[in-house]
């Protein structure tokens, strides 16, 4: 074991010149390879991606966590990292897109390079070498020298064709002065199938995903210098901030202006917040459940594909993102649960629904009956809606008071008609302002994925509404 204080935990950021270079294979393989040596590996993903962290969790045995400088703000990246990396021997951070690609029109914000600087972490650049030899040196030199504050500590060459190809690449990189920490041969694609929003989540293909992660680990173990990479990780700069803590940030959060004056109500035993999970609802940030628990709720997961009733004592409901469009027939067939969700919403109990949750609350999805909580219809489209959003709450709800500003992310190939209710959830600027989502009784339903660590009062307000509804 290499146990370090949290501020100096060894860490690496796995980046690439562009998407499709092999970041996920290398990062996931490194996590699994280090874990197989008995190390506690802390897995992280730059950006809002929900799917890769599922593979990271499988590889490391620890919860995969996101580091998003747009959704949470740059100031929270290091504290959230240290929270996830508690008692870890090494942390591996998978980047997003190309290394310098960030939020559109925002410069470096939320890019892999930006997060690497915030974490004072060395970068390993994964390069697809399949169509180049000496040119690789110019490519790597450009990425290593573009921003002097980003430390590119080495390269892993992917899709190398032969011993001769490897020799040419190494000769070229010797002249660039950048160490080569690994060479991965061209191989049959790992069994990581994709569909309309990226990789198929682990929850939908558990056995096959285990095999895929094992194959990534073996490829990295054989092709990479794990000792050299650990040495590079130990050279990360110390972080001076404190680790994020759900209970602490809730204690520091401003009071809810709508809560009556007087002593804070005591949390009753068994205040249950049900959180949808299973193959149809796989998208969530771990910090959401941690904040709900810190606010006094008992967080109980359930699977809308299999469970016919909500958990006993449910006082509030959270339905995050996922793929209800893939499971529309099965979700529709579970009529008892659809009726239970509708009945709960009718009582005015808090219900927070994001993206997939929004679709599930509609009257129907692709012609199949859903919960009918919202007078709206959802359907698949060919158009991908993707991007960060600046949002302001336009209606008081179980999550926020009107005027609350948050940042969100949209990622879907569906449309809901109408797109907003009489009381909308958010005013969104993309690039012009539009109303989006639904607020009715205790329901807050929207396409926007938000990260509650950026506004922890959301969780506290939701739990307090559970107590009083």
Image: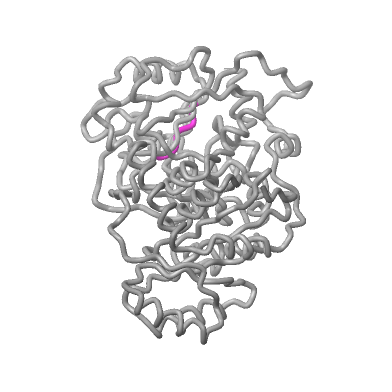
Q: Position of residue 150 (x, y in %)?
A: 61, 71
Image-based side of 84 in relation to 143, left or right = right
Can residue 405 be spotted in the picture? no
- Quadrant where the C terminus sits is top right
Quadrant housing residue 248: top right
Q: Which residues are magenta?
A: 351-355
- Most foreground residue, 454 or 147: 147
Q: Position of residue 410 (x, y in %)?
A: 42, 49
- Most foreground residue, 433 or 46: 46
Quadrant housing residue 188: bottom left
Q: Is residue 389 magenta?
A: no
Give the total number of marks visible in the rendering. 0
Q: Is residue 352 magenta?
A: yes
Q: Residue at x 71, y 63 (%)?
A: 237
Q: Is residue 375 above or below residue 159?
A: above
Q: Residue at x 64, y 39 (%)?
A: 456
Q: Is residue 345 above or below residue 431?
A: above
Specify the principal SS of the magenta part: strand
């Amino acid at each position: 074991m290499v146990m370090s204080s949290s501020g100096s935990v060894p860490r690496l950021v796995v980046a690439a010149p562009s998407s499709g270079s092999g970041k996920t294979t290398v990062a996931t393989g490194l996590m699994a390879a280090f874990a197989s040596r008995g190390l506690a590996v802390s897995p992280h993903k730059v950006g809002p991606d929900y799917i890769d962290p599922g593979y990271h969790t499988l590889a490391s045995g620890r919860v995969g966590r996101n580091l998003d400088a747009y959704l949470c703000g740059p100031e929270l990246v290091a504290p959230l990292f240290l929270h996830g990396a508690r008692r870890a021997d090494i942390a591996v951070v998978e980047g997003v897109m190309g290394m310098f690609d960030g939020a559109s029109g925002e410069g470096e914000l939320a890019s892999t390079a930006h997060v690497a600087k915030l974490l004072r972490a060395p970068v390993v650049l994964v390069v697809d070498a399949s169509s180049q030899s000496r040119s690789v040196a110019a490519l790597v030199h450009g990425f290593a020298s573009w921003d002097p504050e980003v430390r590119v500590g080495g390269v892993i060459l992917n899709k190398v064709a032969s011993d001769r190809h490897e020799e040419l690449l190494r000769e070229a990189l010797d002249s660039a002065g950048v160490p080569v920490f690994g060479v991965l041969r061209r191989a049959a694609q790992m069994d990581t199938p994709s569909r309309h929003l990226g990789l198929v989540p682990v929850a939908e293909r558990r056995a096959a995903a285990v095999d895929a992660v094992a194959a990534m680990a073996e490829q990295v173990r054989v092709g990479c210098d794990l000792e050299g990479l650990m040495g590079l990780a130990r050279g990360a700069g110390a972080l001076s901030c404190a680790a994020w803590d759900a209970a602490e940030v809730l204690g520091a959060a401003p009071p809810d202006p709508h809560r009556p004056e007087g002593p804070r109500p005591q949390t009753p035993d068994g205040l249950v917040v049900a959180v949808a999970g299973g193959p149809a609802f796989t998208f969530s940030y771990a910090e959401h459940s941690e904040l709900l628990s810190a606010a006094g709720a008992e967080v109980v997961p359930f699977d809308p594909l299999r469970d016919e009733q909500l958990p006993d004592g449910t006082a509030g409901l959270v339905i995050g993102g996922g793929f209800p469009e893939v499971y529309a027939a099965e979700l529709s067939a579970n009529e008892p649960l659809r009726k239970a969700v509708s009945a709960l919403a009718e009582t005015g109990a808090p219900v927070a629904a994001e993206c997939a949750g929004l679709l599930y609350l509609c009257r129907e999805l692709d012609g199949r009956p859903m919960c009918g909580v919202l007078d709206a219809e959802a359907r698949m489209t060919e158009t991908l809606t993707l991007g960060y959003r600046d949002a302001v709450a336009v209606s008081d709800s179980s999550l926020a008071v009107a005027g609350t500003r948050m940042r969100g992310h949209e990622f879907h190939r569906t449309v809901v008609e109408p797109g907003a209710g009489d009381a909308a959830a958010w005013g969104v600027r993309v690039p012009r302002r539009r109303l989006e989502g639904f607020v009715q009784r205790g329901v807050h339903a929207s396409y926007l994925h938000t990260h509650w660590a950026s506004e922890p009062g959301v969780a506290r307000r939701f739990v307090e509404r559970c107590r009083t509804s």
